[in-house]
Image (cartoon, rainbow, N blue to C red):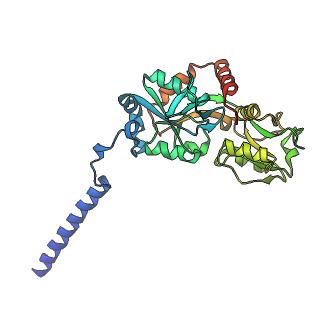
Amino acid sequence: MKMKKTLCILLAVVTALSCVLAFTACNKDGKDPSDAANPSETGAAVSSTLGANDLANVKKAGKIVVGMECDYKPYNWAQTTENENTVKIKDGMYADGYDVQVAKKVAEALGVTLEIKPMEWDGLIPALNSGNIDAVIAGMSPTADRRISVDFSDTYFDSVLVMVVRKDSAYASATKIADFKGAKITGQQNTFHYEVIDQIEGVKKQAALPNFAALTQALAAGSIDGYVCERPGAKSAVESNKDFTFIEFAENNGFKYDLTDASIAVAMRKGSSLTSEINKVIASLTSEQKDALMLECIARQPGE
């Protein structure tokens, strides 16, 4: 009898614990999961499994929220003047650049307004997967590492890697990456631009820098001999800094990398229903239109 009573008590305890654990697993924060806010409306954290609802959520919110640095000319930048090309970020500050123009085309095709959220490069993908933004349109390459955590659209610009140097530098006449032996070279952090520097034998690889502005400032100050970037970024730097030039390497003289790594695409949550819609917008742009748009952005970018 005593044994039977003990077994009954144990069974009751196990049953109670099972209920508690099941409730906790399904409702970890103590709230009804159905109350989760629309990421386009509030930026509340959402699971990547909700990517299938992205298009519906954007339509419901009436806007698409896009993340970018607003500090990576000619792809994106911030300025204090408003014009027909800009999108307001906040009072007295407006975004422009190649990414901004592509984002405007996406919003127009979806029939919604465009909201741009400026943020640090390292925060873009976390912001996307937490639901703070709906897409990243920020001069981002669809690398294999990034594809692990996000999906990408088709590419909306293709480029190559070059080296930006000072005109008065001993490296200004370089024709191959081997010519940079002993040079102090860097690139933007958390980009493959920085990784390929290891292909230069004897290079003095410097610490990666956080953004485009830091790279150009370091080169202007002489603390580095050059930095690796894509051709549009180099053209932008030369346009803003008359003392700069860039070196484009002939085949077999430059860096070795997957060409898609130098292409630019829109990042979205895994399984996002926005992907096919954004791909339609990209497909509507010819190579000539993309090149012309990039040249227009380089021509009107603000100086340093």
At 61% from the left and 29% from the top, the residue drawn is: 97
Percent x, y of residue 230 = 71, 36
Residue in the image at 86% along x and 52% along y = 182
Q: Nearer the viewer, residue 134 or 238?
A: 238
Residue at 39% over, 44% down: 44
200 lies above or below 5: above
Across and down, in percent, residue 172 comes to: 87, 39
Q: Is residue 298 left or right of residue 123?
A: right
Q: Residue at x 78, y 39 (%)?
A: 164
Q: Is residue 20 left or right of residue 288?
A: left
Q: Is residue 240 left or right of residue 122?
A: right
Left or right of residue 36: residue 191 = right
Task: Work out whether residue 140 can be spotted.
Answer: no
Measured as percent of width and height from the top left, residue 183 is found at 84, 50
216 or 48, nearer to the observer: 216
Asked whether residue 135 appears in the rendered view, the answer is yes
Q: Is residue 93 above or below residue 297?
A: below
Quadrant of the image containing the N terminus = bottom left
Indicate whether 121 appears above or below 58: below
Q: Position of residue 240 (x, y in %)?
A: 73, 33
Q: Name the image quarter holding residue 256.
A: top right
